[in-house]
Amino acid sequence: MGAGRAPRLRALAAATATVLAACRGGLTPGERAHLPGVLVVAVAGRGGADLLAVRPDGRRWRLSARPEAEWPAAADPCGRGLWAVTTGATPPQARLVWQPLPGGRGTPVGPPAARVGEPAPLPDGSGAVVAASWASFADLYLVRPGGPVRRLTVEPGGAFDPTVAPDGRAVAFASSRPGHLEVYRLPLTGGSPRRLTFLGRDSYAPRWSPRGDLIVFRSDRDGAPRLYLVRPDGTGLRRLSRRPRPLTVAEDAPAWSPDGRRLAYVERTPSGPRVWLVDLARGAERRLTPEDSAEDVPVWSPDGRVLALRAGRSTATDLVLVRPVEVGRTRLGVPGVRGPLVWVPAPRRCPTELDMVRGGP
């Protein structure tokens, strides 16, 4: 083969791959290269699960190889790393870890305990609110890498599922103080929790909108887990989806788009999980997952252009990228993806407390 022919063939192959990807509705290599940030997933490892960093263009590297399992939990909004949780084989078995990017040794935050997890990062990247059993069955704590731990709640029945308001002034969470789980709101500067839901059945896993105007949460008030929306003052309660569903079908894993205008969520059916997308302004809803596929754990790219999903069943799983406005998907070839997905944004300057009071950096 001539010296000049091989480069031309490689260029032709790359161009063909780009055209085929566009025809299938998938992302072209150029589009993938310009997606910001890094996906972090759990894959099989020495302790059961290790952290793997995956760029949208397919490049990847292992972040951890601990003797215990390690799971991604939440992205640092400033793009410097992520919060992860390790789980060991003997109690106390869980521990919160701050994992820097692009790599390096993770820093344990707080002591080990039977229950540690669900970190909700502060919008300025200075720390997170975490539910842990450090001094009780489960309460909320404000933690910072290398800093002190401050207890926020004293809930005899437990406090769970924290989510921090985008202005950093309050945290919503689930509490079992009425004898079942309901959603409450607590100022981070102190004070008494305010109850937001009165549904009489378990209501939990709140997630605050990036716009600050709504909170999505899960409740089994109708017999099967469904997703609901409520304003931060407790008014405007409504179902997220207008679709009637049998009691054998559950809704979970809501994921807000970065602009807070759309919500992806998972419909769990006896035949497998499927991802749906709701446009909140128009009320339009459509399924992103093909009928014969199994996909779940949606997470948005930081720019809101695509979603990453875990595709497949059991251990035969992979990462796929999906545009929210088109049919087609791009497989990243990451076998054995386990647990949650976290998409860490590119490093950026985060707003300070003064910035947030003024309305932005």
Image (spheres, helix red, strand yellow):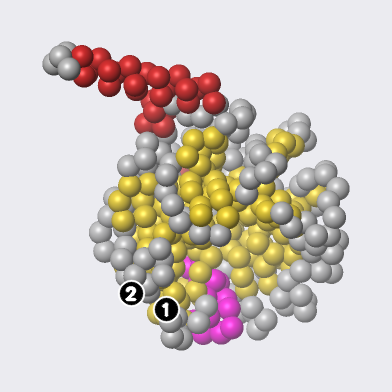
> Foreground residue, 170 or 30?
30
Residue type, mark 1 in image:
Gly
What residue do we see at 65% from left, 83% from top? Answer: 156
What residue do we see at 54% from left, 71% from top? Answer: 131
Q: Residue 88 carries which label?
A: 1
Percent of width and height locating residue 337 = 47, 55
Percent of width and height locating residue 224 = 80, 62
> Foreground residue, 154 or 240?
240
Mark 1 surroundings within 10 Å by alpha-carbon count, few (fewer than 14), some (14 through 19), many (20 or more): some
In the rendered image, the vertical position of residue 33 relative to residue 103, given as above or below: above
Mark 2 surroundings within 10 Å by alpha-carbon count, few (fewer than 14), some (14 through 19), many (20 or more): some
Q: Quadrant of the C terminus?
A: top left
Q: Magenta segment: does it hold 70?
A: no
Rounded to the nearest angstrom, the CA distance separating label 2 from label 1 is 8 Å
Percent of width and height locating residue 204 = 69, 64
Q: Quadrant of the N terminus?
A: top left
Residue 260 seen in this snapshot: yes
Residue 68 falls in which quadrant of the image? bottom left
What segment carries the magenta color?
Answer: 126-142
Number of numbered discs: 2
Q: Is mark 2 on a helix, strand or loop?
A: loop
Percent of width and height locating residue 141 = 51, 71
Q: Which mark is residue 290?
A: none
What residue do we see at 33% from left, 17% from top? Answer: 12
Residue 301 seen in this snapshot: no
Residue type, mark 2 in image:
Pro
Q: Is mark 1 on a helix, strand or loop?
A: loop
- Residue annotated with mark 2: 67
What residue do we see at 61% from left, 70% from top? Answer: 160
Q: Magenta segment: does it hold 129?
A: yes
Q: Which of marks 2 and 1 is nearer the N terminus?
A: 2
Query: Is the C-beta separation of discs 2 and 1 under 8 Å?
Result: yes
